Amino acid sequence: MTIGSTQSGILWFLLVLISLINKSHGTYVDIKDLGAKADGCFDNSKVLMDAWKKACSSAEPSTVVIRRGTYMVGPVMFQGPCKAPISVRSQGTFIAPVDINKLKSQDGWIIFQSIDDFTLSGGTFDGQGSEAWSKNDCAKTGKCSSLPINIRFNSLRNSIIQHVTSRDSKLFHMNVLSCQNLTLRRLTIVAPENSLNTDGIHIGRSNGVTIRDSNIKTGDDCVSLGDGSQQVLVEKVTCGPGHGMSVGSLGKYHDEQPVTGVTIRDCNFVNTMFGVRIKTWPASPNGLARDLHFENLEMKNVGTPIMVNQEYCPYNNCENQAPSRVKISDVRFKGIRGTSSTKLAVQIVCSRGIPCQNVEMTNINLVYTGKDGPAFSQCANVSPRLSGHLLPPACTAKS
Ligand SMILES: *[C@@H]1O[C@H](CO)[C@@H](O)[C@H](O)[C@H]1NC(C)=O
């Protein structure tokens, strides 16, 4: 059969179109083509690694595609650097082995490491943690290192994590370490209120991390910022149940880096133990937390909505009661309103060794939900600068 000029014109047009689409979208690697099985039993770890290696070595932008289905996945590390921008696009659910012994080979279940221009879009990561929680003895030993974190982001740069769900992690849901310019948005994080140490997102030693438009329900801090967290923005996040959002804890270890430039704004806290907190250990080495802004926060039935605690000592196993040497300065609490479920709505207990400096409180309106008296606030080693409407009145009880 001969091809007429109209037909060849259409064929030519289609070829150009296909090459244009290929150019703009780059290389696709579908894990199904490499033998992935969404039956909830087959271990897809090796298939995922093969897909990643193929995409990562592509000289043009690449995408690993995960279609709908439930995939059993063992410990996996998505390791860079890659040759070009790379994405993982998932509509699937990954489930982790229940048995923690199957996850001993690395300190997280899923690890993304040393990648620039990375995008993770979609997907559910189910840590199947309920058995691990019952064996968690962190409270007694102070160490939880034997339990894997659901997802680790190590040394990512200029990257985006979006539309991801993390559920029932065995320990923290997400850990961000040594990242630069990382945005996490539209995340859903879920674990039961009584699950131990299931922090939502922990950030450490990173610069330029944004968390926004997300919903976190968990058994520990929704967001916690460890040492070296710099230029961090948390906005439009709903937290609860959980322990609220924290700077710290700081001052437990030597060589901790300063925490600077943190803004938590436009967030909702619902039925959480705390709202926003800064916590440092007693008897700490020198440290620094500066330039911390907490603004426009709505509290609903929150234990203590505002807290600075420089005598942080969970489980009361601190031998040395010397003051914390973490210096806290330039802190602003502004526009924080709603209800507290304990009378102690505001507690600012700074170090008697190094008092807090330049703390500002503006427009606080917190009402205790109980009937046995109004909310009060407690201060120590701080003289906050006050303005606007303040309820409870600042520093009504001196400690
Ligand atoms: C940060 O990362 C995003 C996403 O990759 C990118 O679009 C943006 O240009 C980066 N910003 C800077 C300052 O490099």
Image: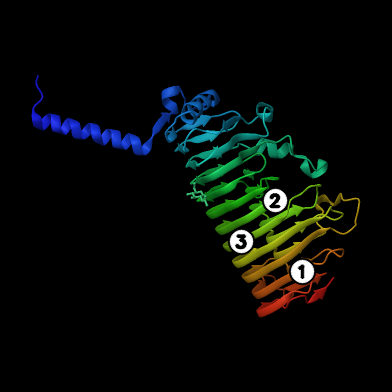
Of helix, strand and loop, which one carries label 1?
Answer: strand
Of helix, strand and loop, which one carries label 3?
Answer: strand
Q: Quadrant of residue 342?
A: bottom right
Q: In the visual, does 49 lie left or right of 68?
A: right
Observer able to see residue 344: no
Judged from this view, the residue extending furthest toward the bottom is 388
Q: Return the residue at label 3.
A: 264
Residue drawn 10% across and 24% down? 3
Front residue of 229/214: it is 229
- Count of numbered badges drawn on the protein: 3
Amino acid type shown at disc 2? Gly
Q: Return the residue at label 2.
A: 228
Residue drawn 58% across and 30% down? 76
User: How far apart are labels 3 and 2 at the CA level?
Assistant: 17 Å
Look at the picture and state if 172 lies above or below 32.
below
Amino acid type shown at disc 1? Gln
User: How far apart are labels 1 and 3 at the CA level?
Assistant: 19 Å
